[in-house]
Amino acid sequence: MANGILKGKKGIIFGALNDKSIAWQAALKAHAEGADFVLTNAPIAMRMGEIKNLAATCNNAQIIPCDVSKEDEMQNLITKSMEILGGKIDFVLHSVGMSLNIRKGKSYTELDYKFMHDTLDISAISFHRLMKTLYNSDAMQNEGSILALTYIAAQRVFPDYSEMADAKSLLESITRSFGYHFGKRNKVRVNTISQSPTVTTAGSGVKGFGTFVDYAEALSPLGNANAEECADYIVSMFSDYTKKVTMQNLFHDGGFSFTGFSEDVFNVGK
Ligand code: NAI
């Protein structure tokens, strides 16, 4: 269903680890819609090599490694991306998340604060770091679009989502705060998409993830949104059809966030 809605646009896409990744699907859609972009991920993730297959499919997109917690790597990414793409950037997707405490099996009541600092840094503060670098490098095209991905645990308690809930709250707050400044100066819009639980490497790391997915599927009138559907929403947010949407947390969850009850929930796990 490609319509060329990103024709001539240049972007940066963070976080394509494998073909399950939301960012991977977003890259495929952005390419189909006519965009040129740079792909990036943490150097350690790149060693797994799969991103090269994606790059080859997307008009031989260039890949630039960047650990989002490192300011110098972020600056290098932005500078090189502008060189490669031949000018300012129209869109950026931050599709990055990692919880060290979840990975190390530490429960919310027993958080290790060193791990927590790293979680908040990688999953939330990195979005500020990214925007600060873009802003100070005057790298964004006027009326460009910047997006990050979030989860409804920022608003409601999902106990096993643990410290990632705190990280997502911070991410959503940074979105509003930086969205103001970028809007004022460059008419750049900054938003988060709050996505349904989706079977990916990051998602599957959360304890009881399968039950999460089934529960959300049963409660949502439209059912869960998958990664490909999320990618459709992402490209619409990068297009010129959404120029006045900014500082928002946009639920892309089949109606989950506003549904109080559904009988289907009783059949989960039966
Ligand atoms: P994924 O595991 O495919 O993507 C996460 C990415 O973050 C990976 O590519 C990983 O290499 C990257 N990353 C981790 N640490 C990094 C660092 N220091 N520097 C640079 N990159 C780093 O999983 P998914 O699900 O596609 O995650 C993308 C985003 O979507 C995340 O923000 C996640 O929290 C969010 N999200 C995911 C949901 C799900 O159920 N899968 C639901 C709602 C939001």
Image (tube, rainbow, N blue to C red):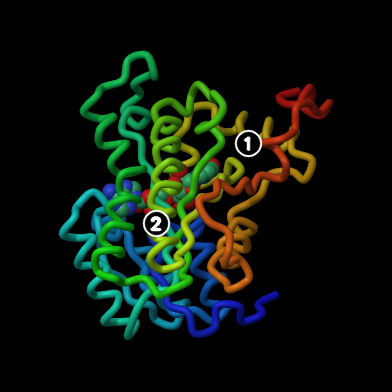
Mark 2 CB lies closer than 8 A to ligand 1: yes
How far across and down, in percent of the image, does residue 153 sit? 53, 31
Identify the residue at horizontal 46%, vertical 52% (top origin): 148
Say whether residue 223 is left or right of residue 123. Answer: right
Above or below, 217 relative to 43: above
Q: Quadrant of residue 165?
A: top left
**N-term-proximal mark, 2 vs 1:** 2
How far across and down, in percent of the image, does residue 124 sit? 36, 43
Q: Secondary structure at mark 1?
A: helix
How far across and down, in percent of the image, does residue 180 sit? 43, 53
Identify the residue at horizontal 43%, vertical 54% (top origin): 179
Instruction: Work out whether residue 20 or residue 156 is closer to the camera in this orientation and state it.
Output: 156
Say whether residue 181 is left or right of residue 147. Answer: left
Above or below, 270 relative to 14: above
Identify the residue at horizontal 29%, vertical 78% (top origin): 82
Say whether residue 90 is left or right of residue 7. Answer: left
Mark 1 CB lies closer than 8 A to ligand 1: yes
How far across and down, in percent of the image, does residue 211 sit? 62, 29
Q: Quadrant of the C terminus?
A: top right
**What's the residue type where badge 1 is placed?**
Val
Which residue appears farthest toward the left when viewing the image? 72
Instruction: Work out whether residue 182 or residue 84 is closer to the camera in this orientation and state it.
Output: 182
Do the residues under discs 2 and 1 have CB atoms within 8 angstroms?
A: no
Label 1 CA crowd tier, 10 Å (few <14, some 14–19, many 20+): some
In this figure, which residue is indicated by the disc labeled 1? 213
Which residue appears farthest toward the front when viewing the image? 184
Q: Quadrant of the N terminus?
A: bottom right
Which residue appears farthest toward the right when viewing the image? 263
Label 2 CA crowd tier, 10 Å (few <14, some 14–19, many 20+): many
Identify the residue at horizontal 54%, vertical 27% (top origin): 208
In this figure, which residue is indicated by the disc labeled 2? 15
Q: Quadrant of residue 152?
A: top right
